[in-house]
Image (spheres, grey):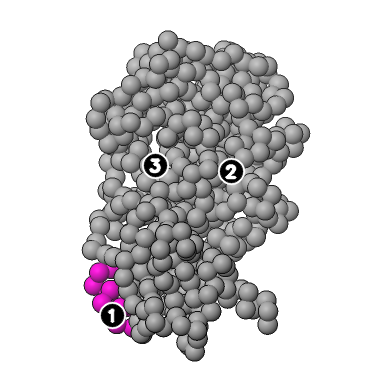
């Protein structure tokens, strides 16, 4: 049984949660009984074909009945996932805000007055709100990243050609990608593993070899030399916080010249390259332009006025900008990964509808160039701003760096301590990702002077340890400030159940080959033992001999060493 939604009007005048879905499978379309994704529920953006459901691309007059599943849908069903239905989008995947649909605007999962981001608006919303485990979007100019950043979820934008686009209504076929939304990197990476593969029936499919080694513990990340947040001081502060978090994880920021990236991005809509958007729906548009909502109609119509010579001239410009940008990846002084805000600001739905072109362009300030220059990217949650809205960052790498970006993205996401999407659920433990070769390692929880940014943290980073998560112990510990230690150090003591508290810790992963030299640096009365975390898992961690705590200051009530250090500084 299929249930479909009717268009609300050609004027988008509000946002409702039910606008996220355009058609539902009732019951769900079951996948294989076993497989990598068995037990998971998913949705797909309604420009991706599903046999038995109409494909509308959010344009009722364009709707048709597919004769087969899109290649990626078939792959996911084969891997065991079950399909719940199809989701709303900016019409013809043309937009980054989620308000350009006759079926209604999709709200932000945290504040319905704000945009969800687009064009994969519905897919992001149903993931963030827990209605499905993952969803497919598409990404031509950022549609798989902006909605992720605005809704506190993960968005993987794979290397072009890694996932077949056969069965996708194209937006700009040479730069289209199927994208993946999930609440954790591990889930998104599992979906990528199931979905990827060469398809000889897709003219843009490629057989790619992906890098399988994680980025080094000491890595260099690029930061645009010029940043614009369009007056949003909260977003600007959140991005500075993100830079510091990557520093704490072993990264070194490097200023990069953003000019060639920005120039490449501008070509997507401000040159003959926009003709590819018109070409994608040319026969329909020529006959039914009046059925296309504004400003999508004007964007597509702009593609009618260019010649073939104009397109070649634009392609030459793009190649030139790509050559200039390539210098940032050079070995030696080059960067390992590029860091940008996923979106530089949030907009209300009312503001977006009042100025739909300029504000939409602002949302894509750090996205449009990625596919044009053949990069891979992942958007991961970074923080919740003081106004309650999410802020996300995007990690960008060369074609084929998909697994490396996922590995770094997972470590970054889990270090934030954020909840999943818009749900009151903590992140699960990080998982080994399918495309990264594991190495023998040990996880150790640190509680004091070894925390990121603290005096002894270098003892971890020098041994290629990487930050896995910021979390808490089980509620069975007490924390003391040890007297006479330089630098100041705490002592952590396990106590009887009900007499302790949860204490803030960081979990670091260290190559086993370096673990012995690290333990040798730990002075008595401190040592290493088993430590139970809030989720019930056990890791190696700092503990203290009970007799050393006689006369020590009990700081358990502060909940962690950082809070104690901050209280001392305030008192001084």
Q: Quick one: label 2 or label 1, which is nearer the N terminus? A: 2
* Residue at the spot 58% in from the left edge and 76% down from the top edge: 565
The residue singled out by tag 1 in the image is: 517
- Lower position in the chain sequence, tag 3 or tag 1: 3
Q: Quadrant of the N terminus?
A: top left
Q: Residue 57 location, x and y as percent?
A: 52, 22
Report the label total: 3
Is 563 positioned to the left or the right of 215 in the image?
Answer: right
Prevailing secondary structure of the magenta residues:
helix
Q: Secondary structure at mark 2?
A: helix
Q: Nearer the viewer, residue 167 or 121?
A: 121
Residue in the picture at 67% in, 53% down? 386
In magenta, the rendered stretch is: 509-521
The answer to which quarter of the image holds residue 212 is bottom left
Question: Is residue 333 located in the magenta-colored stretch of the structure?
Answer: no
Q: Quadrant of residue 35?
A: top left
Please provide percent x and percent y for residue 302.
Answer: 63, 30
For label 3, count other residues whose C-alpha is less than 10 Å away and answer few (under 14), some (14-19) or many (20+).
Answer: many
Q: In the rendered image, is residue 367 in sight? A: no
Spatial CA span between label 2 and label 1: 43 Å
Indicate yes or no whether the magenta region holds residue 511.
yes
Give the quarter of the figure containing the C terminus: bottom right
The label number, if any, that marks residue 282 in the structure image: none
**CB under 8 Å between callouts 2 and 1?**
no
Tell me the residue at 34%/77% (across/down). 527
| Residue contact between numbered discs 3 and 1, judged by CB atoms under 8 Å | no
How far, Cα to Cα, is label 3 from label 2? 17 Å
**Residue 81 seen by the camera:** yes
Q: Residues within 10 Å of mark 1 (few under 14, many from 20)?
A: few
Give the side of residue 50 with respect to residue 380, left or right: left
Provide the residue designation for mark 2.
150
Residues 112 and 216: in front is: 112
């Amino acid at each position: 049984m299929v249930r479909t939604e009717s268009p609300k009007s050609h004027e988008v005048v509000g946002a409702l949660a039910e606008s996220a879905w355009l058609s539902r499978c009732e019951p769900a379309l079951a996948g294989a009984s076993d497989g990598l994704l068995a037990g998971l529920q998913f949705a797909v953006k309604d420009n991706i074909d599903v046999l038995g459901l109409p494909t509308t691309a959010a344009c009722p007059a364009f709707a048709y009945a597919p004769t087969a599943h899109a290649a990626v849908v078939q792959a996911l069903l084969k891997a065991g996932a079950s399909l719940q239905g199809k989701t709303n989008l900016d019409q013809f995947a043309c937009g980054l805000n989620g308000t350009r649909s006759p079926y209604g605007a999709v709200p932000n999962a945290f504040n319905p007055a704000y945009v969800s981001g687009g064009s994969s608006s519905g897919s992001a919303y149903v993931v963030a709100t827990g209605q499905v485990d993952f969803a497919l979007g598409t990404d031509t100019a950022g549609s798989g990243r902006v909605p992720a950043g605005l809704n506190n979820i993960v968005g993987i934008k794979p290397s072009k050609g890694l996932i077949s686009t056969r069965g996708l209504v194209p937006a700009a076929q040479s730069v289209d990608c199927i994208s993946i939304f999930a609440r954790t990197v591990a889930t998104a990476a599992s979906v990528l593993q199931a979905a990827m593969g060469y398809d000889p029936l897709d003219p843009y499919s490629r057989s790619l070899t992906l890098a399988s080694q994680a980025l080094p513990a000491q890595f260099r990340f690029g930061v645009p030399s010029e940043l614009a947040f369009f007056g949003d001081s909260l977003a600007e502060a959140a991005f500075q916080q993100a830079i510091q978090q990557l520093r704490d994880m072993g990264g070194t920021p490097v200023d990069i010249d953003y000019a060639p990236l920005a120039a490449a991005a501008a070509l997507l809509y401000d040159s003959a390259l926009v003709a590819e958007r018109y070409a994608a729906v040319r026969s329909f548009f020529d006959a039914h332009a009046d059925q296309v909502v504004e400003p999508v109609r004007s964007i597509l119509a702009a593609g009618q006025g260019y010649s073939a010579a104009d397109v070649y001239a634009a392609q030459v410009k793009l190649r030139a900008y790509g050559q200039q940008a390539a210098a940032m990846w050079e070995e030696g002084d080059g960067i390992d990964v590029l860091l940008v805000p996923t979106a530089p600001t949030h907009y209300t739905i009312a503001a977006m509808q009042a100025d739909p072109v300029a504000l939409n362009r602002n949302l894509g300030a750090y996205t449009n160039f990625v596919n044009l220059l053949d990069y891979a990217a992942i958007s991961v949650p970074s923080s919740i701003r003081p106004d309650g809205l999410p802020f996300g960052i995007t990690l960008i790498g060369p074609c084929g760096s998909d697994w490396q970006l996922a590995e770094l993205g997972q470590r970054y996401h889990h270090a934030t301590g954020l909840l999943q999407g818009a749900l009151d659920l903590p992140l699960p433990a990080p998982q080994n990702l399918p495309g990264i070769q594991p190495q023998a390692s040990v996880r150790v929880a640190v509680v004091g002077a070894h925390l990121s940014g603290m005096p002894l943290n270098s003892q971890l980073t020098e041994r290629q340890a990487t930050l896995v998560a910021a979390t808490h112990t089980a509620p069975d510990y007490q924390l003391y400030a040890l007297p006479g230690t330089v630098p100041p150090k705490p002592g952590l003591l396990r106590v009887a159940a009900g007499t302790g508290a949860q204490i803030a810790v960081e979990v670091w992963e260290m190559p086993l080959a370096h673990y012995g030299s690290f333990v040798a640096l730990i002075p008595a009365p401190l040592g290493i033992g088993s430590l139970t975390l809030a989720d019930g898992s056990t890791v190696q961690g700092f503990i203290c001999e009970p007799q050393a705590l006689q006369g020590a200051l009990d700081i358990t009530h502060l909940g962690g060493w950082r809070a104690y250090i901050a209280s001392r500084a305030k008192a001084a």
